[in-house]
Amino acid sequence: MKKVFMIGFVFALLLALSAGLWAQTPGKRNERPDVDPARKPAKSQGKNHYSYEFTRPGFVYEKIVIDHDETGKGTISFLKDGFEEMLTDPVQLSPVTLAKINDALGELNFLESDEEYQHQNDFSHLGNIKIKINRGGRERSVKYNWTENKFAKTLMDEYRRIGNEYTWRFEMLVARENQPLLTPGMMDGLDAFIKRNEISDPTEMLPFLTELSNDERLPLMARNRAAKLIKQIDKKKK
């Protein structure tokens, strides 16, 4: 009887320890993967500062903030539905993207102008944006949600495209770690973004797509679609 009791006691102790370890294991499927040190946000070194903020409660990403300097180095922070805190990743805008932004600012004569770009009708259900530029100690910010000004629209569109790219990257990294079977569909989503001109500079995605095309954690279908996108982007470059 004493031997039986000891066996039962040890078995119960093992069960208790196993339960404790299980309780400590993260269970969230949409949790953020560990950030590679190379991907940690770095402080921008430039003197000029560009800031874009998008807010729209109820959207999957209800707040997106992009900050960068004149070299394109900066951060993107976003609040995703279901998360309690903003997440932050580094950004490095390409010369192509920076040129589009600076050309629009130049056409607007942004810092010297006092023009209000907001359309007479309110379209806040689509989301509100705030753009703030600081150059050489001069600063100006504007808020609008829709505009008929061609260059003000270009400005908001380019930042939206940047947000599309970097939130897609985030979703792909999470899916790769937690739900790789979702990645083929996400490749299709990126393909649709590119076809609709909803990514500012697709060539900037080539290194990441190359990494994904060789990542055996992803299903073969996802890797093949990544390789196909690389060919499509390369073809447009030529």
Image (cartoon, helix red, strand yellow):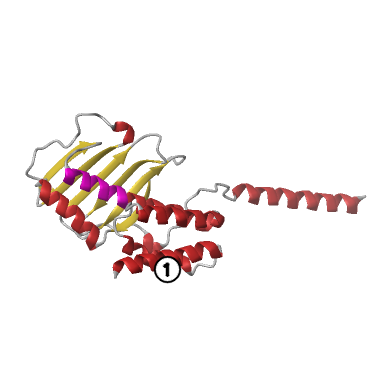
Q: In this view, does 185 lie above or below 208?
A: above
Label 1: element kind: helix
- Residue 185 location (% of width, % of height): 50, 54
* Image quarter of the C terminus: bottom left
- Residue 34 location (% of width, % of height): 47, 57
- Asked if residue 153 lies in the magenta stretch, the reply is yes
Query: Residue extending furthest right?
Result: 1
Q: Is residue 165 above or below residue 234?
A: above
Residue type at the position of mark 1: Thr
* Residue ID at (45%, 41%): 83
- Residue 2 location (% of width, % of height): 90, 51
Nearer the observer, 99 or 131: 99
| Horizontal relation, residue 121 to residue 14: left or right | left
Nearer the observer, 227 or 86: 227
Dominant secondary-structure state across the stretch colored magenta: helix
- Asked which quadrant contains residue 36, the reply is bottom left
* Residue ID at (47%, 51%): 32
Would residue 94 be seen by someone viewing this image from the given angle?
A: yes
Nearer the observer, 116 or 134: 116
The magenta stretch spans which residues? 150-162
| Horizontal relation, residue 17 to residue 113: left or right | right
The mark total stands at: 1
- Asked which quadrant contains residue 95, the reply is bottom left
- Residue 124 location (% of width, % of height): 29, 32
Query: Residue extending furthest top?
Result: 121
- Asked if residue 82 lies in the magenta stretch, the reply is no
Q: Residues within 10 Å of mark 1 (few under 14, many from 20)?
A: some
Say which residue label 1 marks: 210
* Residue ID at (56%, 56%): 181
Would residue 33 be seen by someone viewing this image from the given angle?
A: no
| Horizontal relation, residue 227 to residue 235: left or right | right
